[in-house]
Amino acid sequence: MALIEVRNLRKEFNRLIPKTGFLSGVRNLWNTNYLTHTAVDDITFEVQEGEMLGYIGPNGAGKSTSIKMMTGILVPTAGELSIAGLVPWKQRREHAQNIGVVFGQKTQLWWDIPVIESFKVLKTIYKIPDSRYNKNLNIFRELLELHEFENTPVRQLSLGQRMRADLAAAMLHDPQILFLDEPTIGVDVLAKERLRTFIREINRDRGVTVLLTTHDMTDIEKLCKRMAIIDDGKILYDGSIDHLKSQFGSERTLIVELDDAPYSLDIPGTRVLREEGARVWLSYNRDRLNASDVMMNIAKTHTIRDLTVEEPEIESIVREIYETGMNGRKKEEPHVAVLDV
Ligand SMILES: Nc1ncnc2c1ncn2[C@@H]1O[C@H](COP(=O)(O)OP(=O)(O)OP(=O)(O)O)[C@@H](O)[C@H]1O
């Protein structure tokens, strides 16, 4: 049985249609005209124990709404949800013991008290035994370098420090599942790397199952093997990152360094992306050409000094899917490629 089971999950919100015109402010007080907006539209997926799933999508796609249902904050309009055998919004207390949650946009800690005092409050709330609390605190202190700021009130922390404190707080009670909603948003490169190392280690050493939402594709590439793409409340893709790359990333970039300046290199089947002195970046479709064909064609007119082929970046593949849907289809025809990973 999967640890997270989501079946035909749906969430609708009612939005007020504002009245305009004369005395609109007053008339809106009695306004009962609502428009139903479907934020999550019949999604189905599973997450196995110990897996790390990247859950991505453009702004307003329905990611946070999904996480809020999975964490028990929101009640779905329809569908089924079982997490570690519990229904989040019905068994909230038991469920809270099984999960850790980090919302990058909003701290779970108390703003005015030192980080360590927030941890003590959480110890009491979750009834964490002394030995377990001390053991976890020591491990997290080292992994996240908490000693730098554990006696500082949360409101005085930098964003990177706050995220480190939030991650530790979410893991103090040893949850088996961690929901991360944009945990690296706004933090610098070094802090991002520290957060990623922590997430990787708790997944590897403690077997914690992770559901990660982020707009940073490097987070996904560095942490997850599997990714689900949601847009307009629907799952467009659910499968391995390698499969997505091999299926949708057929554009390759060949970078050649020549003995002389290329002066508008014109190689059939390729497109010049950039030229810099004697270096030129050429894009070609791997399904129609291979690197050696392109190379041979260049060698007819130039002497090649150096050459590299760049793999497609997941970021550009995902951007294309957001823009045009799967397989270049329009978004009104969502296509779900469910794969075993
Ligand atoms: N409480 C609410 N009432 C009405 N509409 C809502 C509410 N919460 C979310 N929505 C709408 O539901 C849709 C999905 O929102 P959600 O926050 O889940 O998106 P998201 O994928 O997390 O976006 P982002 O990446 O910008 O955080 C959006 O159109 C949003 O405006």
Image (spheres, grey):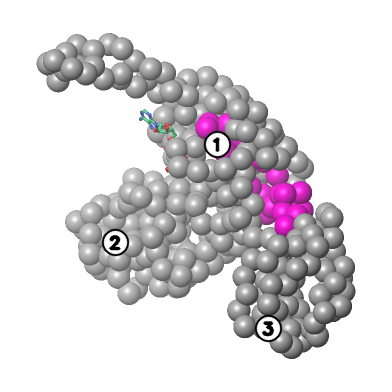
Instruction: Name the element at disc 2.
Output: helix
The three-letter amino acid code for the residue at tag 3 is Ala
Left or right of 269, for residue 200: left
Task: Choose between 329 and 270: the one closer to the eye.
Answer: 270
The three-letter amino acid code for the residue at tag 1 is Asp
Instruction: Name the element at disc 3.
Output: loop
**Magenta stretch contains residue 117:** no
Q: What is the span of residues highlighted in magenta in the rendered image?
A: 225-252
- CB atoms at circles 1 and 2 under 8 Å apart? no
Residue at image point 81% right, 63% down? 268
Across the whole image, how many numbered discs are drawn on residues?
3
Instruction: Name the element at disc 1.
Output: strand
- Residue at the spot of label 2: 115
For the residues marked 3 and 2, what is the alpha-carbon distance in whole angstroms?
58 Å
- State which quarter of the image contains the N terminus: top right
Left or right of 27, for residue 180: right
Residue 156 quadrant:
bottom left
Q: Which mark is residue 231?
A: 1
Residue at image point 68% right, 40% down? 328
Residue at image point 45% right, 42% down? 59
**Magenta stretch contains residue 250:** yes
- Category of crowding for the residue at label 2, using alpha-carbon neighbours closer than 10 angstroms: few (below 14), some (14–19), many (at least 20): many
For the residues marked 1 and 2, what is the alpha-carbon distance in whole angstroms?
36 Å
The three-letter amino acid code for the residue at tag 2 is Val
Q: Which mark is residue 261?
A: 3
Residue at image point 45% right, 34% down? 65
- CB atoms at circles 3 and 2 under 8 Å apart? no
**Does label 3 or label 2 sit earlier along the sequence?**
2
Residue 73 quadrant:
top left
